[in-house]
Image (cartoon, rainbow, N blue to C red):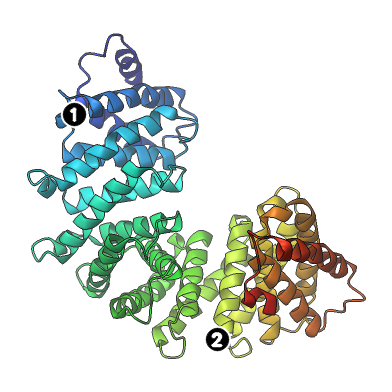
Amino acid sequence: ALLDPVIHKCNQKPEARGIYAQGTVNLLWAVAKLVNNGLALEKTAKLKEAVVALLPHVKTKAESKEEKDRFNTQGISNLVWAMAKLVDNGLALEKTPKLKEAVAALLPQVKTKTESKEEKDRFNTQGTSNLLWGLAKLVDNGLQLEMAKLKEAVAALLRHVKTKAESKQEKDHFKPQEVANLLWAMAKLVDNGLELEKTTKLKEAVCALLPCVKTKAASKEEKDHLNTQAINNLLWALAKLVDNGLELEKTTKLKEAVAALLPHVKTKAESKEEKGHFNTQTTTNLLWSLAKLVDNGLELETTPKLKEALDVLLSHVKAKAESKEEKDQFQPQAVTNLLWALAKLVDSGLELEKTAKLKEAVCVLLPYVKTKAESKEEKDHFTPQAVTNLLWAIAKLVENGLELEKTTKLKEAVAALLLQMKTKAESKKDHFIPLHIANLLWAMAKLVDNGLALEKTAKLKEAVAALLLLVKTKAESKKDHFIPQHIAK
């Protein structure tokens, strides 16, 4: 009933009277809050209509000489957060041009307010956190990072993060959730093309935040505020940043931050109150993150808390994969990430034979590979990269002691994947990059070397034949070529 007058007033010509800058902020913030708390955007037509009617007002007011100054720092922060939340809950950025226009109109305001001597102090830690999180969410949902105004807004915010994180007066004001959101946002921006090496301010902001992670994780007063989601986001963010060039060996603060978070993983995963928050996605992300960190120099043998965290996570994988209620929540991407993570950990020194939970987790995941690869609904979710990662992971596990002959589920999983690989190599050949092709041939050679009979496995021969054509194409291509490491594989 309240949405009708909002829609009516916003659609009035000339410019709707009575809807001022602050009113626009409050209305969009309120709608985003309702959606964030369960009001389905898709099922509430008027809600979507109200959002679409409000968006042109954001653009008009942000660009108006008379009114633009009425969007104060808090207002801008709330608007970006609200639009990101709406996009995160189903408002398609590509299909809502007014949303893109509203964001584009706000970006210069973000830069101006952040750099203004009078206003920059009004960007408190929460405002800064909301803005970076909001921009990262929008980028993750299709907003082009190459947009000059967006890059300038991000750069201005990163300076703010560094200043606040290093300020004696303000550093304690970064709440655990804000630290998690900021690092997640920076990792997401990097994951979407912001280059860590070429963005000094990004590296400086990350390094300034790392001691905050350690302090919050070690503080008796604050550690309980680090909920499961925050720990998950923090470890995922650190792993992503490391995967994109942040050197673990050369960044002591990074190692200390990871070490401070590890006991939380174990505690939360074992807690009766919190273990319900450990859904398949969280368990997958955490294992993937830890495997990525190990793959980039975190030593398995010299980090006892790491082994303890892994042990409790492996129990979760097995329990979830065997649970009737949860097994459908294992999407192809989750299965791929989990098996890749387990193989990486084994490749980095976690002994398959001596780690019962690891072997159990692998065995319980294998039937999923077969089921997902053969499912008509789900098989297309196995991208060329997913098929590559799965075959590489299985080959690595076999190389480290998983016996092909004694594990029927393993043979069935391989057979189902080979069929997928042949189909994709013939239909989506341009999606196979040289790294995929090199890893796939290496994986198949390893499996044959460990007992997969080439003569008796027709699908293997067909898969190899399909890949050899790709080898020839890539080797002759000037753009997409094999580096020496690929040729060696």
- Residue under pointer 2: 350
Answer with the quarter of the image where residue 39 lies: top left
Q: Residue at x 76, y 72 (%)?
A: 409
Q: Position of residue 436 (x, y in %)?
A: 66, 66
In this view, which residue lies farthest toward the front? 478
| Residue 140, numbered circle | none
In this view, which residue lies farthest toward the top? 13
Q: Nearer the viewer, residue 155 or 123?
A: 155
Does 356 appear above or below 52? below
Amino acid type of the residue tagged 2 in the rendering:
Leu
Mark 2 surroundings within 10 Å by alpha-carbon count, few (fewer than 14), some (14 through 19), many (20 or more): some
Do callouts 1 and 2 mark residues in contact (Cβ within 8 Å)? no
Residue 87 visible (yes or no): yes
Does 108 appear above or below 481? above
Q: Position of residue 451 (x, y in %)?
A: 82, 83
Helix, strand or loop at label 1? It is helix
Does 99 appear above or below 88? above
Answer with the quarter of the image where residue 81 lies: top left
Answer with the quarter of the image where residue 112 lies: top left
Foreground disc of the pair 1, 2: 1
| Residue 68, numbered circle | 1
Helix, strand or loop at label 2? It is loop
Mark 1 surroundings within 10 Å by alpha-carbon count, few (fewer than 14), some (14 through 19), many (20 or more): some
Does 215 sit left or right of 467 as displayed? left
Q: Residue at x 46, y 78 (%)?
A: 296
